[in-house]
Image (cartoon, rainbow, N blue to C red):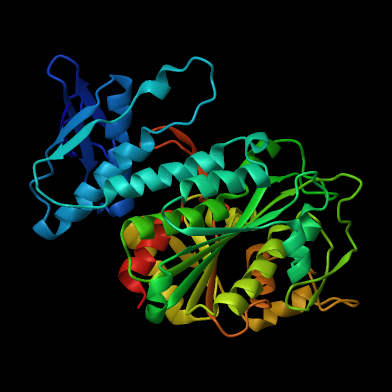
Amino acid sequence: MKVRFSFKTNKKDIVFKGEYGESLYNPKTKELTIGLGDIKDEPLDAHKIKLLGGVIGQVGRKYNETTFEITLPKSIDKSEEVVWVREIEFGIRVYTHLISFKTHDENKRYKVKKIVFNKKVRTDAKMLADVVNITRDWVDTPSNMKTPELFAQKVKNALKGVAHVEILGEKKLKGVGMNGVLAVGQGSKHPPKVIIAEYGKEYKKNGTYAFVGKGVTFDSGGISLKPSKNMDEMKRDMAGAAAVLGGLIALAHANVKKHIIAVAGVVENMPDGGAQRPGDIIKMFNGKTVEVLNTDAEGRLVLADLLSYTEKRFKPRIMLNFATLTGAVIVGLGHRVAGVMSNDQDLVCEILNAGEESGDRCWQLPLWNEYAENIESKIADITNIGNPPGAGSIIGGIFLKQFVERTRWAHVDIAGTAWYDLKKPFSFSGATGFGVRLIYELVKNHLS
């Protein structure tokens, strides 16, 4: 398939107008034209270019074209070529990758064979796409196929030869006092696991960078049961864990000379007779007590233990956590940008810049100490939800802040970006792999 791009035209008497994402394919000549729109009015950033790659890939899949010869627009500067090549190839490879459990599915046979550009530019697009697709598969896998034990094994297999993997089971978690993790998992017959992946130990002198992920493999809400509608989506409540593990894999493949730690708390939140109850009080890993007012605010209990444990054990220079933490972030920011909160403004700026360059875009929310009043408890140190209600995403962040002492830290709420239904410029539904490229770009090119 030969691919070229076309700008928007004002002519009214033609079929193809060159609108952004519009496509015109000629099966006889195997030529595909993709519309760029009017880039003077609407410049194309990395994210939009990536979606154009998705358009190309989906047309290729439809016509079973596995080889792409792509001519970049003549108008782009030489300095822009690397972004165009990287994002187009990444988009093609990611948006043609589908997970399916159908007995007979022709889509499973499709595989991109070759992508050639008219400009000779080396990028990491294929490696990043491969890693993102692994994380997407983890997130989209049904919960019965990725219980905490099964998921831990999947991760161990994926990281073989890439990183050292340590898995903490129930006995070890009790021994170290990760009671937040244990409390969330006590209603499930599948005991929780904490996965610790370590890469580049020999580079510790260059600094340790830690990434912590929420890995709730299914979230029923516990005793505070969720509504049944769309509860099937809660198989994806471990997207934060997938992101931090995928980020480590990508950095390892790039041979980044930094010490990277990925910690994932993997647990099921279920409502059986042994489940934690609203009103329970938990003594967390760092000694603080939490009054559980809602068992559906479980992710922060898992992350809180992981953050304080990671800080104490590894003493990282930088620590980020990724989590599908709150529905409130979707209300505030929708499905196109993640919310970021931090105790360090310079770190926020680096994350925002890395987000723009990677396409995993973020937007800052405040984390002022005044919000801590909302989680005061009469009988414990803090509560796990806010009272009065409101500012749900920020309350989640202010809760986590209580479990970080001195480390430069940021919380990235990916509840809106971890999966979505995309309508334009093409149809897409499912996990996005959000966070992998953000971590990769941040550590590789921004943090020192």
Count of labels in the image:
0
Q: Residue at horizontal 48%, vertical 76%?
A: 318
Q: Position of residue 97 (x, y in %)?
A: 39, 33
Q: Quick check: 26 left or right of 447?
A: left
Q: Residue at x 55, y 76 (%)?
A: 314
Residue 13, position in %: x, y? 16, 24
Is residue 432 in view? no
**Residue in the foreground of this view, choosing between 219 and 156:** 156
Q: Quadrant of residue 21?
A: top left
Q: Position of residue 372 (x, y in %)?
A: 72, 78
Placement of 387 over or under 161, stated as above or below: below
**Where's the C terminus, which quadrant?**
bottom left
Q: Position of residue 444 (x, y in %)?
A: 33, 67
Q: Residue at x 68, y 69 (%)?
A: 304
Q: Is residue 338 above or below residue 444?
A: above
- Visible in this render: residue 38? yes
Along the viewing direction, whichever of 112 and 350 lies nearer the viewer = 112
Q: Is residue 334 above or below residue 287?
A: above
Q: Quadrant of residue 96?
A: top left
Q: Which residue is more in the foreground, 201 or 132?
A: 201
